[in-house]
Every structure is written in structure tokens, then in C-alpha cells.
Image (tube, helix red, strand yellow):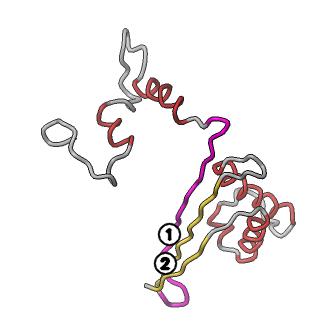
Amino acid sequence: MGPDGYAQEMTNEEYTYASVLGPLGFVDADNPLGLNGSFYPFDVTLKLLEKVWTPGPSDRDCTVMRVYATGEYLGNEQQIVYSMCVPYDHNYDMSSLAKGTGAPFVAGVELLLSGLCAETGILGPGYVGKNADYMQFIRNSLQKQRFSYIKRVIKL
């Protein structure tokens, strides 16, 4: 909202559903409305948007992700950028979101089943990522699943 209480003009970069629906109260989950506070605007908005945001049987999706990591390596400051685009998988009739979350999960399970990783307990991504052998195993597993990414190293 602008200082005068009216919606301000936004550029294309700033225009998102949340930037419009939020200030209007459509995603308010804290203040009930209706007779005796019988519903929340968020619940109504969710129900209405579900119809248009739920993919149909013939819809195809694509998931795009970019990860930035900045730090020092061998005394040099650098940034590593991983970019990936996971398209809908026509061979398996699998959404990009299912493949994008399922493939890394399968790689992690394969790592544990291989015996290469004998540790027990909670092994978060940061822990697994510090071990070069684990990471190479996971990269190989993802490659077998036709899951690809581009790695770019930028010296700072």
C-alpha cells in the first residue's frame, strides 16, 4: 500500500499475487471474519485459488531453481552458482515438482543403502555436502535419474 492507503503502482518485478492479496487481507490467517468469527480470509482464498493452481491431468510443469554459495576456497573468495531446470517427465508421467524432490531423496536413500555412508542419526544436507565421496555418489545417482544442473564458479 502507498502512504495514502491506496495500492501503489508496481513494476512487473514487484507484482506478485502476495504483493496484491496480502495488503488486501486475503491471506490473513489471524483475524477471523463472518458471523462469530466463523472463517479466516486465508482459508477462503486458499479454497478459491486451489481451483486454478491445482494442475489438471494434461498440465505440464517446469521447476526452476538457482542456488548461490559464496565463500573462500584455497585462499580465494568465490561464488558457486548451481542452476537447474527440471521439466515434466513425459516418460514417467511425472511432474517436475515430484521429480525435483523425489530424485534427491532417492539419491540419499541409495547412498545409505550402498554402505558408503555408515553414520547414523540425522544427516542434514550440510553434513553430507562436506564429504566429497558422498557428494560424488549423489551426483552420479542424480545423473542416472536424468537430473541435470549447471555449475558455474565465479572468482570474486
Nearest the eye: 16 or 90: 90
Q: Are marks 1 and 2 in contact (CB under 8 Å)?
A: yes
Nearest the eye: 54 or 103: 54
Nearest the eye: 82 or 124: 82
Q: In this view, does 55 lie above or below 46?
A: below
Question: Dot 2 corresponds to which residue?
Answer: 79
Q: Residue 68 carries which label?
A: 1
Q: Quadrant of the N terminus?
A: top left
| Upstream in sequence: badge 1 or badge 2 | 1
Look at 59% across and 75% down and name the residue there: 151
Q: SS of the residue at dot 1? A: strand
Query: Is residue 69 covered in magenta?
Result: yes
The image quadrant that residue 85 belongs to is bottom right
Q: Position of residue 96 (x, y in %)?
A: 65, 51
Query: Is residue 66 covered in magenta?
Result: yes
Spatial separation of the CA atoms under disc 1 and disc 2: 7 Å
The image quadrant that residue 73 belongs to is bottom right
Disc 2 crowd, CA 10 A, few/some/many (<14, 14-19, 20+): some
Q: In this view, does 18 lie above or below 148?
A: above
| Direction from residue 60 to residue 136 in the image, left or right | right
Magenta-highlighted residues:
56-76
| Direction from residue 18 to residue 126 in the image, left or right | right
Q: Is residue 106 above or below residue 49?
A: below
Residue at the far left: name it: 4
Q: Where is residue 107 in the image (x, y as percent from the top left)?
A: 76, 61
Residue at the far front: name it: 58
Look at 55% across and 58% down and name the residue there: 64
Q: Amino acid under label 1?
A: Tyr
